[in-house]
Image (cartoon, rainbow, N blue to C red):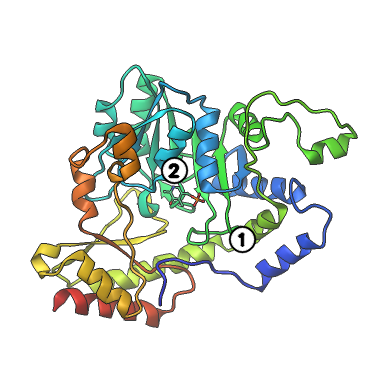
Amino acid sequence: MIPYGRQSIDEEDILAVTQVLRSDWLTTGPKVEEFEQAFAQYVGTKEAVAVSSGTAALHTAMYALGIRPGDEVIVPAMTFAATANCVMFQGGTPIFAGVHPETLLIDPEQVESKINSRTRAVIAVDYAGHPADYDRLRTITDKNGIALVADACHSLGARYKDRNAGTLADLNVFSFHPVKHITTGEGGMITTDHSKFAGRMRLFRNHGITTDHYQREATGTWYYEVVDLGFNYRITDIQCALGLSQLKKMPDFLTKRRQIVARYDKLFANSQNLRPIKPKENVSHAFHLYVIAIEFDAIGKTREQVFKLLRQSGIGVNVHYIPVHLHPYYQKVLGTAPGDCPTAEMMYKKILSLPIHPKMTEAQVDEVAEKMLRVIDQ
Ligand SMILES: *Cc1c(COP(=O)(O)O)cnc(C)c1O
């Protein structure tokens, strides 16, 4: 099976991890700060705060903003559930906004129409690796005095009008799950230029305690204070060593992803029934996903049939995403329903994600495209 995404690990990564295993600090040690600083430098922010997953990073961001019961946070319907779940973790209410049918990015007009006196923030998702329209979103959030958060879990290495993903919102969230651009096994990061937010987030990831073990060891004290209710969202030095090693390979990883996209685009150029989701001119896309839209009515096959045929022939296609407001939990708890976000629901019925990851060979790309075309054009 050619998977839709997977990690690219080499001997250098393995060596970096084994060196930490032989060292004194497996967690809360020097590698955490080293990874944070290298990551902040890579994206171009003052601060980066590392945590145990992308989901923990989203939750930590919601805590930093002080989201609490009664607060509303606007999120796109077309995303992974964690983008909305993080609002619920803090007792807030996610409000689902529709997406643009061409990019599947949150629609700024929809955002504006959903703002009221309870709205505290907007979380934009850089779907597939394409930065959302941050200039328009910023105008709207500034006008209303609310925060802008980027769920940039897909867009490490992307650019928007010559600005890097990770610098485009007040708080920017990344994931290091194995299918993402770089991996730490599980892991996440929040980048920001606001030192005050960074301080709050470091507190939250460590039980709400003012200092961590490493700092106490360094200053020779046992005393600490729990000043707020936090979690154990710490990431280990083992993971951060892997992250540091992976980060060095970002230029290669991006080049490889873009080469795969160029090859797919060429192979699909003449298909009537298949349309790759194309980037806008003013962005440099990071291509976490390669998403195509298919007119299933026109080809006389359902998505389920196409999906099964491809999986049976060894192609690990996937669907990103089931609109979050359609999940039973949200229908039950928030009373969301089909029809709430028509464009997201319409596009959900058409999309498929094809395999893309740096270790894919040209022959594999050709095989995916050939099988894809055979299934839908026959
Ligand atoms: C992967 C992902 C997350 C969650 O990250 P984890 O590290 O798996 O917790 C959140 N949002 C989006 C859009 C993602 O793709």
Q: CA distance from mark 1 to mark 2?
A: 22 Å
Residue 327, image x, y percentages: 31, 45
Q: Residue at x 17, y 71 (%)?
A: 271
Q: Residue at x 57, y 39 (%)?
A: 45
> Looking at the picture, which amino acid does disc 1 mark?
Lys
**How many discs mark residues in the rendered view?**
2
Give the quadrant of residue 376.
bottom left
Give the quadrant of residue 211.
top right
User: Most extreme residue toward the top, as rendered?
Assistant: 117
Q: What residue does disc 1 label?
A: 248
Q: Residue at x 63, y 28 (%)?
A: 229
Task: Give residue 359's mark.
Answer: none
> Looking at the picture, which amino acid does disc 2 mark?
Asp
> Does any atom of ligand 1 lie closer than 8 Å to the CB of label 2?
yes
For the residue carrying disc 1, how many other residues have a C-alpha within 10 Å: few (<14), some (14-19), or many (20+)? Answer: few
Residue 189, image x, y percentages: 57, 45
Mark 1 or mark 2, earlier in chain: 2
Quarter of the image with the C terminus in it: bottom left
Query: In the image, 324: left or right of 272?
Result: right
User: Most extreme residue toward the right, as rendered?
Assistant: 220
Task: Give residue 151's mark.
Answer: 2
Give the quadrant of residue 176.
bottom right
User: Is 250 or 288 nearer to us in this picture?
Assistant: 288
Mark 1 residue element = loop
Query: In the image, 191: left or right of 18?
Result: left
Query: In the image, 324: left or right of 68?
Result: left
Residue 283, image x, y percentages: 36, 50
Residue 202, image x, y percentages: 65, 35
Mark 2 residue element = strand
